Amino acid sequence: MVTVNEKDMVFHLSNGRISYLLYVMESGALGHLYFGKALNPNGNYSHMVEKAHRPMTTYIKEGDLYTSYEHLRQEYPCYGTSDYRYPALEIQGGDGSRICNIQYQGYEIRNGKQALPGLPATYVEDENEAQTLQITLKDTWRNLEVVLSYSIFRDVDAVARSVRFVNLGEETFFLNRAMSMSVDFADADYESVQLSGAWSRERAVKVRELDAGVTAVSSTRGNSSHHHNPFLALKRKHTTEQSGDAYGFSLIYSGNFLAQAEVDNHSVLRVMLGINPFGFQWKLMPQESFVTPEAVMVYSPDGLNGMSRQFHRLYRRRLARGFWRDRERPVLINNWEATLFDYVEEDLLRFAEKAKECGIEMFVLDDGWFGSRCNDKSGLGDWKANRTKLPEGIKGLSENIEALGMKFGLWFEPEMVNKDSDFFRAHPDYILQTPGRSQSHGRNQFVLDFSRKEVVDAIYEQMYVILRDAKISYIKWDMNRSISECYSAAYPPDRQGEIFHRYILGVYDLHERLLRAFPELLIESCASGGGRFDAGMLYYAPQGWTSDDSDAIERLKIQYGTSFCYPLSCMGAHVSACPNGQVGRVTPIETRGNVAYTGAFGYELDLNGLSDAELETVKEQVAFYKKNRRLIATGDFYRLLSPFEGNFAAWEIAAPDGTRALVTVTRMLSEANGPYRRLPLRGLYAEKEYHIQGRYNAYDAYGDELMQYGLILEDKSSGQIIDGSGGCEDFLSVLYEITEKQRDAGSVI
Ligand code: DGJ
């Protein structure tokens, strides 16, 4: 998959569907040629190096009026030598100089793909699944070695990149900026797509037309954040969900990030992704090395949806890992929205018994079970059961739940502490705080200094005891505030720029240790809902709580946006009570179920409060999800109608072998006498005949009819779905089951 033209020093990574091309310039720097649809492997490509003499340009060699890094497309640009755009690398030496010039030294090609020490990354199970090109560059002045790694996957249209820096000299210097990837595109005629929002409205799809200057999203909060996601896509103006060029860039990282697109004044576009340089500085002593997080670049000619399917395929099977990766996830019930902090053991058991009657498989106890925790002012850090609420402790409760025939899951917020806790009283120095300054709080809590091993150890020991002694199959790992006044007492002044990154390495380390000790533990990540919903967490936690907003209509947008990069198998989605706790909306329970099916499904309400009819619906929903959960987790996902663009949201999950599909269509507001509507489907086999079961109607049709003419939408507002019972017809959702028709035994073709 990696070929090298030794004569022209051109490297071509290709799996037959995509190509990534780079070369060594005459100057010794590394240049970028192309990224996109696969190119002929025999090309010469030299015409792609566009050089021109231009006014106001700084050239790198005397007598040469053509070679300027300002105009040449580069592979890993550095600060200081005639490129005035944002660099991927900026270093700072003891002499105060920040200039750097990295020159090609050599390359190596290996089958497979290496792991990154202490960091989450994609992986392979067999070394033929990917090939890795490593290019070594060097700044001889500083004796800095820079190793760029590129892994191309055989079965997914993606290239994974990371960079290793090694100080081979005798002087210490600092990395001020060390991006995971940079690509210079030949033109800037693109729109960028970002996933941005805020708490409870995370990952809304925002499209911006690129123009001269910088378009960027980032986090400085210590977590990837509710506000922006470490993801950026590029599309042409005419690219749709299903066709046209689409590029996706995703960072496998959960801390401060920067994703940036810069258009220069000659319309060359530079895209880069990595640790946010704002607030970052890493001291590199002689013989030390530093490895960046991994960035994944995807190209698809099949539009944004095609790009998403590549990410889904890679992240579900070669980023998520461990016991739960391919297993069917349990249908769970979580007590948070029903009780908040206010419960005792009998309440929980009543909850669980009802849930068991409905076929639910796991009971999850959320916040409030430990220390003196009765509200959010105290208890965080004391990971021992509150015996007033739980007289038999977590061990007793978990055994009682298991005796009902259910699994038991438990909430933790390992990175946080309340000042009103025994843990803080014993270790007041364990929080991140800048000496002499006041400390800001979020939700009355403070952030433990996870850059320090002894702090992580202390939390690990407490969690270990509970997980060892009780029957716990799952943990929900929460994180309810961002970092402020970031400073660690354990590090000297010239290492304070490392703390944000060291913090997240500590978070990863605790995950890793827990999974090593309890390999069958299912971890669901959460940060006030979707505040750390990123590819980094997916390596440890195969599912995450998508958002604290559980309203079905709001969730249409949140889940739709999340699906741009993340597979359905990782989106925690629950049916909650009405009126909804976040927006006060009342939606039919069928709609809540239909929307929540498209993820790791569960409930978040007191089932004892439901009517008999609603309970029957819950039983049917649980049975439906169990029957379909494998298809939902592994099928190809197609976004069909965007809730950002109209009154309808529709999506489809199709089995890759074309035998089945589920289509969910939700109409937000009712309409009078609406038009006839058809929805062209995707991913079916044209020649197969299917049975279509809607909510009210059923019929048969061939795959080509469903994909060309379209699925007929049931719409009683125009005389079809109003069932005569009156009431509000807003927020209606219909789920269509599409199943290949079995042929008669005799009709063998
Ligand atoms: C925020 C989470 O997103 C909620 O689901 C819940 O676990 C609360 N924290 C508990 O404090």
Image (spheres, grey):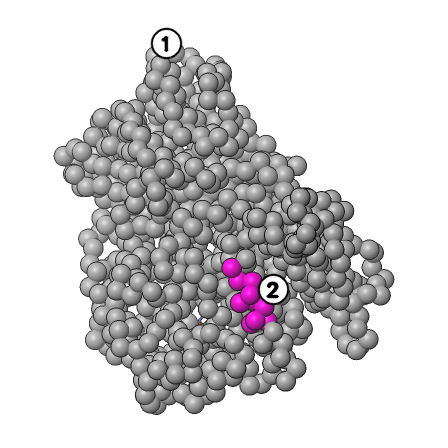
Task: Using the rendered image of the protein, determine whether residue 60 is visible from the camera's viewpoint.
Answer: no
Going from N to C along the chain, the mark reached first, 2 or 1, is 1
Quarter of the render that holds ligand 1: bottom left
Q: Amino acid at mark 2?
A: Val
Looking at the image, which residue is at 16% across and 33% down?
A: 169
Looking at the image, which residue is at 22% across and 27% down?
A: 141
The answer to whether 701 is drawn above or below residue 288 in the figure is: below
Picture coordinates of residue 78, whole percent (x, y): 35, 31
Q: Quadrant of the N terminus?
A: top left
Picture coordinates of residue 386, whole percent (x, y): 33, 85
Q: Amino acid at mark 1?
A: Gly
Q: Quadrant of the C terminus?
A: top right
Picture coordinates of residue 12, whole percent (x, y): 41, 26
Residue nearer the viewer, 55 or 88: 88
Residue farthest along the left direction in this orientation: 170
* Majority secondary structure of magenta residues: helix
Q: Secondary structure at mark 1?
A: loop
Q: Quadrant of residue 419?
A: bottom left
> Which circle marks residue 595 in the picture?
2
Residue occupied by mark 1: 63
Picture coordinates of residue 328, whole percent (x, y): 46, 63
Crowd class of label 2 (few under 14; some 14 to 19; many from 20; radius 10 Å) = many
Q: Which residues are magenta?
A: 621-630
Residue nearer the viewer, 615 or 448: 615
Residue 629 colored magenta? yes
Looking at the image, which residue is at 29% across and 54% down?
A: 505
Crowd class of label 1 (few under 14; some 14 to 19; many from 20; radius 10 Å) = few
